[in-house]
């Protein structure tokens, strides 16, 4: 009996190390989203400039990207050239400025350029919470009906765009 009292904690510790070790081997960019194949949560946000915001209901009609970013985000400048490229290839890109003051977002856009059709201000961060955002940048691919079809966590790289996102946009464009 005394031997069992010694072995049980060791077995539990080894099992716990195994679970955590397995978790560390997983790609955090591939976290599932509860929103996949569902409509965006309802929101209607002001823009960073008067009249520049948008509502979730307006994000329909063609496949597009909804990019969550912030002026204080360290990785967002790294991703920004890709968003400019994507927008230049004719894919609508909408921006959601997360927990950012509109003036800070405007200054950031002035510095890096504006690939967005519109930029909504989510100063309180409530909409990002509803979207399940865990950090910035994160990007959602929406289909023609405004349903989330893919969630990209972290900056979009050329490999992400060419290998995953662009083919998905093409497939969504071809859907009836």
Image (cartoon, rainbow, N blue to C red):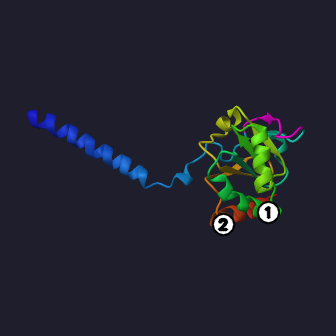
Magenta range: 41-50
Residue extending farthest to the right is 51
Crowdedness near tag 2: few (<14), some (14–19) or many (≥20) residues, C-alpha within 10 Å? some
Label 2's element? Answer: helix
Q: What residue would you read off at disc 2?
A: 158
Q: Locate residue 47, reporting x and y percent.
A: 83, 39
Q: Locate residue 111, reporting x and y percent.
A: 77, 53
Residue at x 10%, y 37% (from the top left corner): 3
Examine the structure image and report whether residue 12 is included in the region drawn in magenta.
Answer: no
Crowdedness near tag 1: few (<14), some (14–19) or many (≥20) residues, C-alpha within 10 Å? few
Q: Is residue 141 visible?
A: yes
The quarter of the rendered structure image containing the N terminus is top left
So how many labels did they put on this image?
2
Question: Relative to 85, does residue 22 appear above or below in the rendering?
Answer: above
47 and 127: which one is in front? Answer: 47
Helix, strand or loop: magenta stretch: loop
Residue 72 located left or right of residue 18? right
Q: Locate residue 92, reporting x and y percent.
A: 81, 55
Q: Distance of mark 2 from mark 1, alpha carbons?
A: 22 Å
| 2 vs 1, front mark | 2
Q: What residue would you read off at disc 1?
A: 174
């Amino acid at each position: 009996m005394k031997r069992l009292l010694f072995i049980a904690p060791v077995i539990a510790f080894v099992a716990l190390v195994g679970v955590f070790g397995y978790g560390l081997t997983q790609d955090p960019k591939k976290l599932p989203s509860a929103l996949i194949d569902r409509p965006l949560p309802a929101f209607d946000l002001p823009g960073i400039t008067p009249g520049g915001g948008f509502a979730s209901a307006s994000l329909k009609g063609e496949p597009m990207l909804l990019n969550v970013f912030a002026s204080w985000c360290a990785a967002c400048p790294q991703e920004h050239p890709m968003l400019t490229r994507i927008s230049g290839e004719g894919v609508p890109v909408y921006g959601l400025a997360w927990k950012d003051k509109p003036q800070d977002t405007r200054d950031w856009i002035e510095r890096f350029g504006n690939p967005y059709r519109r930029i909504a201000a989510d100063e309180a961060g409530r909409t990002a919470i509803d979207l399940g955002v865990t950090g910035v940048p994160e990007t959602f691919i929406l289909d023609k009906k405004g349903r989330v079809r893919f969630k990209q966590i972290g900056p979009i790289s050329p490999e992400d765009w060419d290998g995953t996102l662009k083919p998905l946009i093409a497939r969504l464009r071809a859907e009836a």
